[in-house]
Amino acid sequence: MEQKLSSVAKTFTPSAIQELSHLAQRSNAINLAEGFPDFSAPSHLKNAAISAINSDFNQYRHVQGICDHLANIMKGMHGLDFDPRTDMAICCGQTEAFAAAVFAIIDPGDEVVLFDPSYETYGGCIRMAGGIPVYVALEPPHWTLDPDRFINSFTARTKAVILNSPHNPTGKVFTKDELETIAGACCRRDCMAITDEIYEHITYDNIKHISLASLPGMQERTIITSSLSKTFSVTGWRVGWAIAPAFFASAIRNIHIKITDSAPAPFQEAALTALRSPPEYFEKLRREYESKRDYIVHLIAGIGFQIKFKPQGAFFLFAELPENYLLSDVEYVKELIKQAGVVAVPGCGFFHTTLSTEKLSQVGCSYQERYVRFAFCKSSATLAAAAQKLAELSDAMGCVTGGKNA
């Protein structure tokens, strides 16, 4: 019956990240794979959702107040003016908002530029729309953008650029210079941009998130996507949004209605409480995640990984295996699960390009097979338990490099 599948469906495989999370559940392993918190969501948000359910906000619903709050937030954070009545689309999480944005502007044969490594959803959505993903490799270990490589990726068929900053999986926050390079190319080429800004409130070391839409000439050609999920630890609520000029926002709303009709009504109501959070909430969030980042950096470095780049945002550590370690990322993660009961994500699933040969590892694996992603959006108890298991594994193996070295 496989021939009955569409050509696009045939190219899709199960998400490696979700499969690893399911493995963690089945084997009672510690899940440092998937990017969702294992600690409680804020109690006042849960109470707001319960109140909404009890108040019978349980049918299809559009909560305009979300759009009003988002317009105020965009003005306060980025100095951008959006009309909450016309420039917003509430969707079922950032994932649907992103997909609807792609479906709104991409035709078959259009090329879309993405930065590599890249979260798996982006390329899949582009292919579903009939577009062609064009990956531009960021330069390890600091994941810098080579302007010439980026500019040379454009052709007459380039329709849009995808930007995720703060970046999954690396934790990179794109610099002002890099954003200006991206914006300049979009304006010169008359291209659109779709941004994933879901980690906008999770940055470290006093680094500030800058929205690409805030650069000159970019508001009219940028679709911003984000959600409640990461900032408020409610990844299962599925309330997200797209913010764009009215013409694009209207198209996204129409696509959203055809696909899912409405984001969950009681969680939309609870979103009003979340979006009214005071500045102190976001500062506390940053401090707590920065502490977790420092903890896991120390932990993973302690078992032999190379930490050449400390995450500047988001809540993942993209760590490089030691130079003389012979296993690939996939082989290491399998050993980690079997011997320590800890699950992480092999980095190879985020890569789609290869840099020149001088970037290849001396141990016979390309650099795309040398990284492992660890999620640190976990409770202190979970991180402490992972530390204990990794320490035991380190002692048994003589650190991560032991027993498998050249």
Image (cartoon, rainbow, N blue to C red):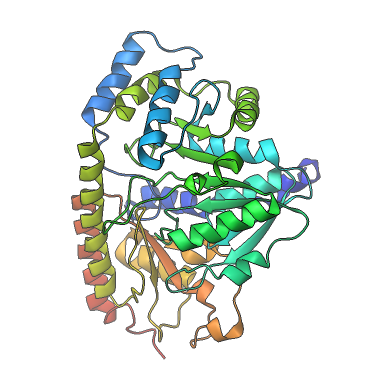
Instruction: Please state the horizontal and vertical placement of residue 400, each as a whole percent of the image.
Output: 32, 77
Q: Position of residue 143 (x, y in %)?
A: 46, 68
Please identify the quarter of the rendering in which residue 310 is found. bottom left
For this orientation, the residue located farthest to the front is 216
Q: Is residue 196 left or right of residue 189?
A: left
For the C terminus, give its image quadrant: bottom left
Q: Quadrant of residue 115 in the image?
A: bottom right
In the image, farthest residue toward the top: 55
Front residue of 7 and 233: 233
Residue occupying the point 25% across, 48% down: 286
Q: Residue at x 49, y 32 (%)?
A: 241
Residue 152 horizontal side relative to residue 169, left or right: right
- Quadrant in which the N terminus is drawn: top right
Left or right, 345 with respect to 208, comes to right
Residue 13 in sight in this render: no
Q: Is residue 344 visible?
A: yes
For this rendering, which residue is in front, 247 or 44? Answer: 247
Which of the pair 46/325 is nearer the observer? 46
Q: Where does the image place residue 323, in percent across and percent down from the top left?
A: 41, 84
Q: Residue 175 in the image: state x and y as whole percent.
A: 43, 61
Q: Residue at x 21, y 49 (%)?
A: 288
Looking at the image, residue 35 lies above or below residue 306: above
* Residue closest to the far bottom: 406
Q: How many marks?
A: 0
Q: Is residue 201 above or below residue 372?
A: above
